[in-house]
Amino acid sequence: MYHHIIVIKKESIWQPIEAIATLLAVIVALLIATFQNKWLEKQRKSKIIILNAKSFLQDQEKSGESYKQIVMRICVKNTGFEAMNVTACIAQIEEKLNNHTGLRSNFLEVPLYWTHGFVYNKSGVLRNIQKNQIAYLDICSGPSSYKSLELSTPVGGNPDFRVLNPGLTILTLALYQKSGQTFYITLKLMWKKGERPTLKCLDLGNKLKPAFKYSDSSQVP
């Protein structure tokens, strides 16, 4: 009778176990790296603050003739991480006309021009804001006679998308970013024909304020 002796080497036993252990280690490392990157992305947020809102008289030229134009701007600063692909849009217009206050119904959200925005992007409405960088945003403009004002937007066509009426106007401005972060800025515009308009920031946050919060002019700061 012949007996077969099977010799099992230690290496043959441990090789599959080592392979599985190596695979598990790789998977755990990838999971840790993924969650770490997601955590870092959440921490790397921009933080926009408003420094001021002012009006400027600027020399302009059209058809070979020089004239002055008033431009209303806000100045913002990013004190957080870099804000990528920031687009500023007027989300809603609340105005007081004939003693009645309400949202402009025939209005769709329109983008605004960044001051010198064409330096950063050919559209003029898209730019990055680096950490600690200051940026200016054009809100509206008009002739130095103060007889008319229009939003500083490339959108044409329907005048309800750009023309501003005299009186009290509350503008809700949205700053959209590539990261998904959104800042909402509430602006108060006061203007009478023939008089220089004024612009003031009322609020800044990450949520859209409800309409008619400032519908009563006596409650407007």
Image (cartoon, rainbow, N blue to C red):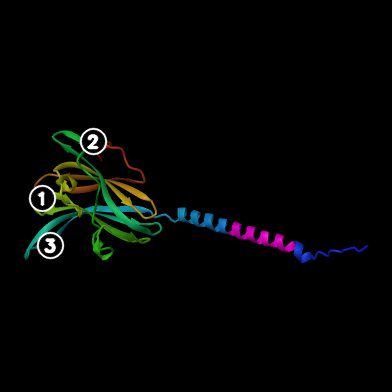
The answer to which of marks 2 and 1 sits earlier in the sequence is 1
Say which amino acid is labelled 1. Answer: Tyr
Q: Is residue 41 left or right of residue 172?
A: right
Question: 92 or 221, which is in the foreground?
Answer: 92
Secondary element type, mark 2: loop
Secondary element type, mark 1: loop
Secondary element type, mark 3: strand
Q: Position of residue 181 (x, y in %)?
A: 38, 51
Q: Position of residue 2 (x, y in %)?
A: 91, 64
Question: 219 or 97, which is in the foreground?
Answer: 97
The answer to which of marks 1 and 3 sits earlier in the sequence is 3
The answer to which of marks 3 and 2 sits earlier in the sequence is 3
Q: CA distance from mark 2 to mark 1?
A: 24 Å
Residues shaded magenta:
14-29
**What is the crowding at mark 3: few (fewer than 14 residues within 10 Å), some, or many (at least 20)?**
few
Whether residue 109 is situated above or below residue 9 in the rendered picture: above
Tell me the residue that label 3 is attached to.
Answer: 59
Q: CA distance from mark 3 to mark 2?
A: 35 Å
Tell me the residue that label 1 is attached to.
Answer: 146
Q: Is residue 29 left or right of residue 150?
A: right
Q: Quadrant of residue 46?
A: bottom left
What residue lies at 71% left-to-right and 61% top-to-bottom?
A: 16
Tell me the residue that label 2 is attached to.
Answer: 215
Q: Position of residue 149 (x, y in %)?
A: 14, 49
Q: Quadrant of the C terminus?
A: top left
**What is the crowding at mark 1: few (fewer than 14 residues within 10 Å), some, or many (at least 20)?**
some
